[in-house]
Amino acid sequence: MLRAPTALTFDDAATVVVEAEASAGIALPALRRSWAEQLNCADIALYEAKRIGGSAVIFDQSMYQRSRAQYRHSQDRRTVR
């Protein structure tokens, strides 16, 4: 199991406990979507997975709309400074 802590013992007998988590963004193939667009959709799904705390998320079009809105908001905040 990925989330289970793992103890690593080194030659000098020091032990370190490591916890690992992973997130995955999945974009199912779609007609008329280039490889670059497909990769962008998977990337958007990955950031959504990270936002909700490390899981796998499948891309849907509503994520694209949220992503664009968040990008515009971040650009607006940069302009104000």
Image: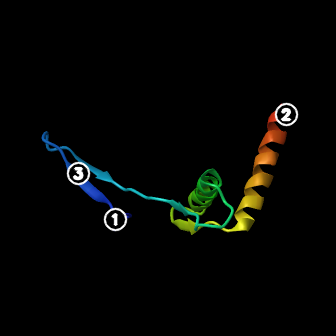
Q: Nearer the viewer, residue 19 or 15?
A: 19
Say the numbered circle drawn on residue 8.
Answer: 3
> Looking at the image, which residue is at 59% across and 66% down?
29
Q: Position of residue 80 (x, y in %)?
A: 87, 34
Outermost residue, top side: 81
| Earlier residue among tags 2 and 3 | 3
Query: Residue at coordinates 45% horizontally, 59% vertically from top-left?
Result: 22
**Disc 2 packing (10 Å; few <14; some 14–19; many ≥20):** few
Q: Of the residues tagged 2 and 3, which is closer to the observer?
A: 2
Instruction: Tell me the quarter of the image containing the C terminus.
Output: top right
Left or right of residue 8, residue 13 in this image? left
Out of 36 and 1, give the one closest to the viewer: 36
Give the x, y percent position of residue 48. Answer: 62, 60
- Packing grade of label 1 (10 A; few <14, some 14-19, many >=20) is few
Looking at the picture, how far across and down is residue 72, in whole percent? Answer: 81, 47
Toward the viewer: 31 or 73?
31
- Kind of residue indicated by mark 3: Leu
The amino acid type, in three-letter code, at marker 1 is Ala
Secondary structure of residue under mark 1: loop
Mark 2 or 1: in front is: 2
State how far apart marks 2 and 1 are (Cα): 43 Å
Compared to 80, does 15 lie above or below?
A: below
The residue sitting at 28% across, 58% down in the picture is 6
Relative horizontal placement of residue 11, taking residue 68 as reference (left or right): left
Read off the residue under disc 2.
Answer: 79
**On the image, numbered disc 1 is attached to which residue?**
4
Most distant residue in the front direction:
32
**Amino acid at the residue labelled 2:** Thr
Q: Secondary structure at mark 2?
A: helix
